[in-house]
């Protein structure tokens, strides 16, 4: 519970690096480094792309930092993080998520879980991405996309909801691995991305990883898609779909809770605006489907997502 | 449902794998593909007079650019403008013939990295903005020019 990752320290180190790098001229084309995902890696808002974050291109180092706020009918999420881009080859990222899980208090009515009012779930994500082939932007005479492999190691700090995660048999840390392919169809001003993730995270990890039997404990392959249309140099609009596992529903059903623990796929439509090379704002309408529908009147969780990024 | 997802996942994995294999022949066809200019691009650039104006402004901007101006200090701007005008005119489907050096030998002795190449693209975008060329048309031209990075960038 008192586990404190060295996040502020690393963030401070990264910011120190920023002040050094800001003098240097980093040379990626506008918006071609993507924006920051909720897990800290570069991509769309919900799904990582094969691009390497920051403004750094070959032979350069760069850094980006972001803050995100999202809210739906019953839940809220605040997140922030940093990413280092090394030589347009390697990306290292750190993210912290703070999820307002207040509705979880209702779980005390099912069993004496001892969930405290206004409980938040925190999660740290350490990400590594390696570009293995291709150039998403400049090879416009070929269908070959830019391809990257990555992993996201996540550790969740559930506070008083820990007793619920224990009951569900979910682990509090897990690692997703993924492969992404990104292609800018330059002549059409369209960017497409496909990501294939191997994961057992519940709600991206906020509800732990895996499940007690008869829920699904093992990882499965989940596809994610993004498409974006570039309106001009500074503005892109797009949509994303992220398929997710539904590990916990079977466990809930066996406990007589029906579909109370069902998990749905995520979708969003977004607009990303980069007024300069160093600043971008992303606004999205998100549909996160049902998130523990048993305590939220079976509502779909829809709402806004707003993220600001600085990059050097 | 789960079956359905697994199928989608497999389809993507296959697409990525096959994409990698297909990329080689497509790569080889690059120059052939570039020979066919997209319909209407030459007109969208304002034909020969428009391209002449564009390249005049572009070269003026390039030689002043702090990131890449140094690469052009031994180049005669007037000759470069004329040569680039012919090249863009031909690429975009106009009735011109580019007779200058190929991209590889033209840049062989220059120390050009990807940051320089991207800076050049940005300057061209600014010049096209100044000429009022719509963004979508700009990207159609850039799609013809971008693959030249393979020959232009000498420092990887």
Image (cartoon, coloured by chain):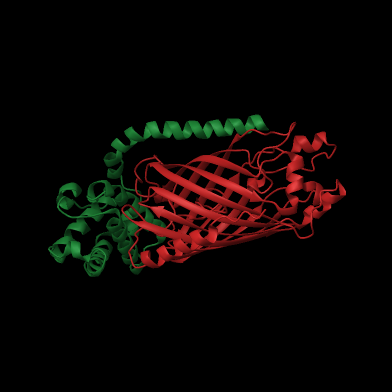
Q: Could you tell whether A130 is left or right of A161 in the image?
A: left
Q: Colour of chain B?
A: green
Nearer the observer, B153 or B57: B153
Q: Colour of chain A?
A: red
Q: Position of residue A286 (x, y in %)?
A: 64, 54
Q: Is residue A282 above or below residue A89?
A: below
Quarter holding residue A152 = top right
Q: Position of residue B52 (x, y in %)?
A: 23, 63
Name the residue: 59% across, 30% down. Answer: B7
Q: Could you tell whether A221 is left or right of B58 in the image?
A: right
Name the residue: 61% across, 56% down. Answer: A97
Q: Could you tell whether A207 is left or right of B8 in the image?
A: right
Q: Is residue A49 visible?
A: no
Q: Is residue B16 above or below residue A239?
A: above
Quarter holding residue B3 = top right
Name the residue: 37% across, 51% down. Answer: A88
Q: Position of residue A204 (x, y in %)?
A: 63, 46
């Amino acid at each position: 519970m008192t586990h404190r990752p060295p996040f502020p320290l690393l963030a401070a180190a990264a910011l120190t690096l920023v002040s050094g790098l800001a003098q240097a001229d980093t040379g990626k084309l506008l918006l071609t480094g993507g924006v920051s995902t909720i897990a800290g890696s570069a991509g769309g808002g919900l799904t990582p792309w094969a691009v390497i974050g920051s403004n750094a291109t070959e032979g350069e180092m760069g850094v980006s930092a972001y803050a995100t706020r999202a809210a739906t009918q019953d839940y809220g999420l605040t997140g922030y993080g940093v990413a280092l881009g090394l030589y347009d080859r390697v990306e290292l990222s750190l993210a912290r998520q703070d999820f307002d899980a207040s509705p979880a208090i209702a779980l005390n009515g099912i069993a004496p879980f001892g969930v405290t009012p206004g409980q938040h779930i925190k999660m740290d994500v350490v990400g590594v991405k390696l570009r293995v082939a291709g150039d998403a932007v400049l090879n416009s005479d070929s269908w070959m996309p830019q391809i990257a492999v990555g992993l996201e190691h996540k550790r969740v700090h559930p506070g008083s909801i820990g007793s619920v995660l224990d009951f569900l048999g979910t682990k509090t840390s897990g690692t997703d691995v993924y492969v992404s392919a990104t292609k800018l169809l330059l002549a059409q001003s369209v960017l497409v991305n496909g990501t294939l993730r191997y994961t057992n995270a519940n709600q991206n990890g906020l509800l732990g990883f895996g499940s007690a039997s008869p829920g699904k404990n093992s990882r499965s392959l989940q596809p994610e898609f993004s498409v974006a249309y570039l309106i001009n140099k500074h503005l892109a609009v797009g949509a994303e779909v992220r398929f997710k596992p539904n590990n916990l529903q079977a466990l809930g059903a066996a406990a007589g809770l029906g579909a109370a623990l069902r998990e749905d796929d995520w979708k969003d439509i977004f607009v990303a605006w980069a007024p300069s090379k160093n600043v971008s704002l992303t606004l999205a309408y998100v549909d996160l489907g049902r998130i523990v529908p048993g305590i939220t009147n079976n509502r779909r969780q829809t709402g806004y997502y707003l993220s600001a990024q600085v990059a050097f | 449902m789960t079956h359905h997802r697994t199928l989608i996942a497999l389809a993507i994995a296959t697409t990525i794998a096959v994409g990698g294999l297909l990329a080689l022949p497509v790569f080889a066809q690059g120059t052939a593909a570039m020979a066919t200019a997209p319909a209407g691009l030459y007109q969208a650039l304002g034909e020969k007079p428009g391209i002449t104006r564009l390249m005049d402004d572009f070269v003026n901007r390039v030689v002043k650019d702090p990131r890449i101006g140094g690469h052009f200090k031994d180049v005669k701007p007037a000759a470069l403008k004329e040569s680039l005008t012919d090249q863009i005119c031909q690429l975009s489907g106009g009735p011109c013939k580019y007779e200058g050096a190929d991209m590889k030998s033209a840049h062989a002795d220059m120390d050009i990295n990807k940051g320089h190449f991207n800076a050049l693209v940005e300057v061209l975008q600014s010049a096209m903005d100044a000429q009022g060329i719509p963004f979508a048309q700009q990207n159609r031209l850039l799609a013809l020019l971008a693959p030249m990075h393979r020959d232009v960038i000498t420092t990887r």
